[in-house]
Image: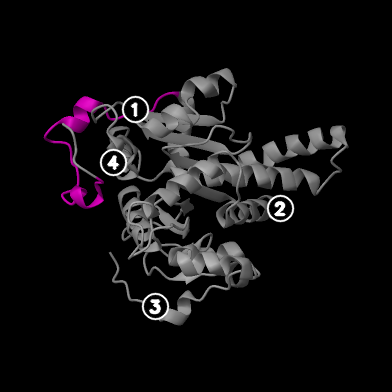
Amino acid sequence: MHSREKEPEKEYAIRSSWWRRPLEAMFPDKTFDGQFQNPETEQVFDFDDLVMVDPDPFGFIEKNIVYYPPGDEQELYTIFIPGLGQTKATSSKRSRRYAERLLTGIANLNNASYLKQNPIFTKINPLLDWIDAAIHRLGLSGSPVINNCARLILYAVNHKQVINFSADSHGTILLGRGLRVAKKKFILSHTFFLNFKGRRHWEERWEQLSHQLINVFAFGNGYQAWVKGPKYIMVFITGDLLPATVGIRPENAQKLKRSDIQFIVFEPIFEPRNFEAHNMMYTIELLRQSFIKNNLKVGDFVALYQALSQGTFKLITATEAKAETFPWPKDMEEYTWGTIAN
């Protein structure tokens, strides 16, 4: 890994809206909600006043924000939205791991946490992230991540540029809602709300353009109402409670005739109700070895989508994953949440 130097504090300056400042004073990590971050340097970039004002925002992201792991050919990068309960330092560490194990570039779009270094109420503070996620899942509250995702999506569609998104857990909810906002704004920017014929036309146009330009790779998805159009890959381990209860599953997609959504569902490798099944770090290792098993270049997501569409992609089995010869990284404990049940 490249050496990381701490950026001067002024580099982290974010121009927050006045109404968010009391929240950010109470929960400092919320300052970085919806802002871009380079996972290598951990430098934060103001979404509005630095990235989107650039004449070529996607070029700015690729040049300044994307972390490419050593050995990567720098052909592809994804905008990644982390799950809940991760400060910007934690999400950067996990994103670097993602980039290095799957050989892809990553730029973080921060999903800020309510966690504090020295909380007054130690038991209540961690629950705030879960409450926030539940509210977002019900569509009852907004988030800077939702609106910023929508703006990136609309820029990509209007300028005919490809954009790749990846998200984990709570991040999938925010991304799913961002896609819905972008679709609605795209349609209404071209026709009136009561023009039903025009809306049908532009909805079809949205589906055509988004299928060409938008790719989504979701871990442990917690959302069901994914808009039609983009190319989706949903990946999780059997036993992960989030996709099993509130996310879209293969049987749902089949009933809805959603051929745009492909699934990678690994066999269970943990005991029932072990939350480690939701840990993206384990899913990444199974996916990495599945690339190798299928003689695909690790990180070739275009070939992966094609293989899934054709039904030819073979997954690592639970037996293979539990074998003594399975190449789990030696530092896996650093990315494990709790005690693993054998």
Instruction: Give the Cα separation between the discs numbered 2 and 4.
Output: 37 Å
For badge 2, the amino acid type reads Asn
Which image quarter holds the C terminus?
top left
**Local crowd size for mark 4, using a 10 Å CA cut-off: few (<14), some (14–19), many (≥20):** some
At numbered mark 1, what does the secondary structure look like: helix, strand or loop? loop
At numbered mark 2, what does the secondary structure look like: helix, strand or loop? helix
Query: Which residue lies under the disc numbered 3?
Result: 7
- Compared with residue 35, is residue 97 higher up or lower down, i.e. above or below? above
In the image, taking residue 323 as reference, residue 185 lies left or right, namely right
The residue closer to the viewer here, 320 or 171, is 171
Q: Looking at the image, is mark 3 or mark 4 earlier in the sequence?
A: 3
Q: Residue furthest left?
A: 324
Query: Which residue lies under the disc numbered 1?
Result: 238
Q: Nearer the viewer, mark 2 or mark 4?
A: 4
For badge 1, the amino acid type reads Thr
Q: Looking at the image, is mark 4 or mark 1 earlier in the sequence?
A: 1
What's the magenta bit mostly, secondary-structure-wise?
Answer: loop
Which image quarter holds the N terminus?
bottom left
For badge 4, the amino acid type reads Tyr
- Compared with residue 226, is residue 259 higher up or lower down, i.e. above or below? above
Residue 170 in percent (x, y) is at 46, 45
Residue 76 visible within the image:
no
Instruction: Give the Cα separation between the discs numbered 1 and 2.
Output: 38 Å
Query: Which residue lies under the disc numbered 2?
Result: 158
Q: Residue at x 88, y 37 (%)?
A: 195
The stretch in magenta equals 311-337
Q: Nearer the viewer, mark 1 or mark 2?
A: 1
Q: Residue at x 58, y 62 (%)?
A: 58
Q: Residue at x 43, y 31 (%)?
A: 243
Q: Residue at x 39, y 60 (%)?
A: 87
Instruction: Give the Cα separation between the discs numbered 3 and 4.
Output: 31 Å
